[in-house]
Amino acid sequence: MRKVHCIVSLLALFVVSLFLYSFSGGITGVTKKSTSPGCTCHGSFTPGVTVSINGPDTIRANDSANFSVIISGGPLVMGGTNIATRFGSLIPGDGMRKTDNELTHIAPYPPSNGTVTFNFKYKSPSIPGTDTIFANGNSVNFNGFSSGDNWNFAPSKRIIITSSTGIINSSEAPKSFSLEQNYPNPFNPTTKINFALHESSKVLLTVYNSIGEIATTLIDSKISAGSYTTEWDASVFPAGVYFYTLKTEKNSNTKKMMLIK
């Protein structure tokens, strides 16, 4: 009788352990994007676990970039994650899977130098604007039970989606740095911006709204000397006053423009 009782107890423990580890392949729908956020199957929320989303803040429309979620703190014998985005699409890295455009781990990851890292790609939507990447991470003791496990949310990462319109080089040889007034101005919804570089330089052309917030980045790359034209399509932006700034390693200039709708 005692032997039967022991067998039943072992079977019960096996079933409980199997249930707890049924989520070891990861779950989705628990980031701040969800209506029911939180990795409650992995113990308690704790600020002692740090989760961060690393990657560029600005991406051109229809482009992709490398990102990572990094987890530290807590027991961290193993770590897992759930990653979601509001508008863009996600491409899983090694050891990850995609379900309903969200990412999670195939199996828990062990730490390296005190952190667990999940790498993935983000592809931006086709129109300029903003997007958000959400993530959380769990830090578990991997003892077969949820007690002692911890988790936390990552700060949501805001992504600025810039115009995919290319720049046109007229192949002229200007004698100095210059930034011209946009044309037309006022405009709705597109306008052209002309500028000239007398030498090769890293160029940053940024549009700001009336309170100084970045609306979009039109150019962020190294460009050879020449006269250039680029276009801003402001279809998704509200009417109002905007400022555009052209910066190189040696020069900077800012001009004002008006979007009307």
Image (spheres, helix red, strand yellow):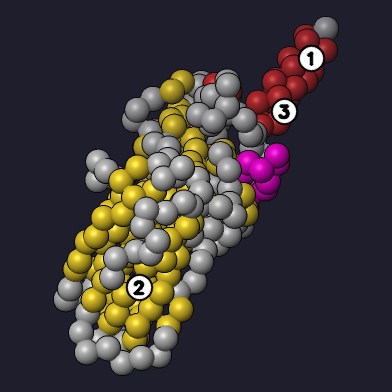
Q: In front here: 57 or 137? A: 57
The circle on residue 43 is: none
Q: Residues within 10 Å of mark 1 (few under 14, many from 20)?
A: few
Residue 194 is a magenta residue: no
The circle on residue 194 is: 2
**Residue occupied by mark 1:** 8
> In the displayed structure, would residue 179 be above or below residue 259?
below
Please provide the residue range marked out in magenta.
95-103
Pointers 3 and 1 in contact (C-beta within 8 Å): no
> In the displayed structure, would residue 243 be above or below residue 153?
below
User: Which element type, helix, strand or loop, lies under badge 1?
Assistant: helix
> In the displayed structure, would residue 6 be above or below residue 248?
above
Seen at 46% across and 20% down, the residue is: 44
Query: Label 2 vs label 3: CA separation?
Result: 64 Å
Of circles 2 and 1, which is in front? 2
In the displayed structure image, the side of residue 99 where residue 239 appears, left or right: left
Query: Label 3 vs label 1: CA separation?
Result: 15 Å
Query: Label 2 vs label 1: CA separation?
Result: 79 Å
Question: Which kind of residue does numbered mark 3 sit on?
Answer: Leu
**Residue occupied by mark 3:** 18
